[in-house]
Amino acid sequence: MIRKSIFIFLLTILASCLSPSQENTSLEVSDEFKSYWYSGEAEITSYDLEQARYGEIRNGEAVLIFVTEDFLPEEQVKANSAEEDNISVLKLNYTKNFITGIYPYSIMQSTFYPLNGEEHALKVSASIQEWCGQVYTQLNNRGDFYITSHSYFQGEADKDYILDEIPLENEVWNRIRINPDDLPVGEFKMLPSLEFLRLSHREIKPYTVNAEFYTIENLNVYRLEYPELNRVLKIYYSRGFPYSIEKWEESYPSGFGDNQKVLTTKAVKKQRIKSDYWNKNSNKNIPLRDKLELN
């Protein structure tokens, strides 16, 4: 009976991966959007990465995985089955891998953006692992933003924050894929990406940002400048649906003391596929990594 129960549970999870619900999607999305994002597949894009860290540029890889799924509003986790109260979200899993000298870095951020007309992401998390230790930060949107942060650094070990709802840099990537024209412009307060805040050991709080759109050749650019942080992020995306993200650049001070200087992290698209990747966990599926040009 136990084995049978586990089998049924796994089948339920698989079914929910393949068939995200469109019922609780109140945003005015096109048939084109529904056809692309509710096809039972994720969009996976690989990027060549040049990552600024400790005052030097490191070569690596980044991957953006966008997929729709059902989300439980109270527990704020992925739903295992279709229920009336579920919220349809566009999820982004954003990964980076690079080497600093002898030891590796692995970074992952996840953002769950609702398609029910809510203004901000329902949940954002970020984890960073390297040989010195690991850090983890999670934001839950429950009217206000409830944030927990854990770190191996003295003074950063275990912290809790409550912030008013404000624009989130992490959700910008999802919003570009849905309707980039709705992104805010001008001067306002924004919470920078959780990755940046942890890598730079900056306080988790809103910072003033200046946002603008412009076009370079055949790509639109959404540019964010944080004067207080001496940081600029530029996201380059296609001008028409599905507003695919082709590259990005992020400039900020890197290094310590007299060796600190402004460097630019860059990521440029290598390959893109649509796939139900959660079913591709056999050794026979390894060639898909070759198709994405992933090491």
Image: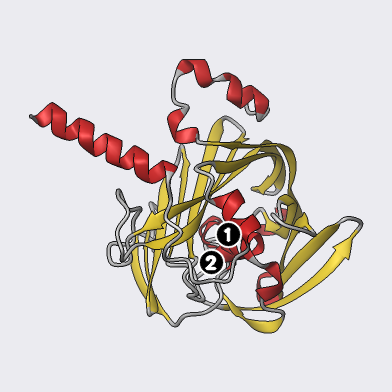
Tag 2's secondary structure? loop
Q: CA distance from mark 2 to mark 1?
A: 8 Å
Residue count near mark 1 (Cα–Cα under 10 Å), binned few <14, some 14–19, many ≥20 = some
Residue 65 found in image quarter:
top right
Rendering colour mode: secondary structure
Q: x, y (%) of residue 68? A: 49, 52
Work out whether mark 2 precedes mark 1 in sequence or the reverse, and give the earlier one: 1
Badge 1 amino acid: Phe
Q: Which mark is residue 202?
A: 2
What residue is shown with label 1? 196
Residue at x-position 71% and y-position 70%: 224
Residue at x-position 69% and y-position 54%: 242
Left or right: 78 as drawn, with respect to 259: left
Q: Are marks 2 and 1 in contact (CB under 8 Å)?
A: yes
Tag 1's secondary structure? helix
Furthest-right residue in this view? 217
Q: Eyeballing the image, is 293 above or below 50?
A: above
Q: Which mark is residue 166?
A: none
Q: x, y (%) of residue 223? A: 75, 67
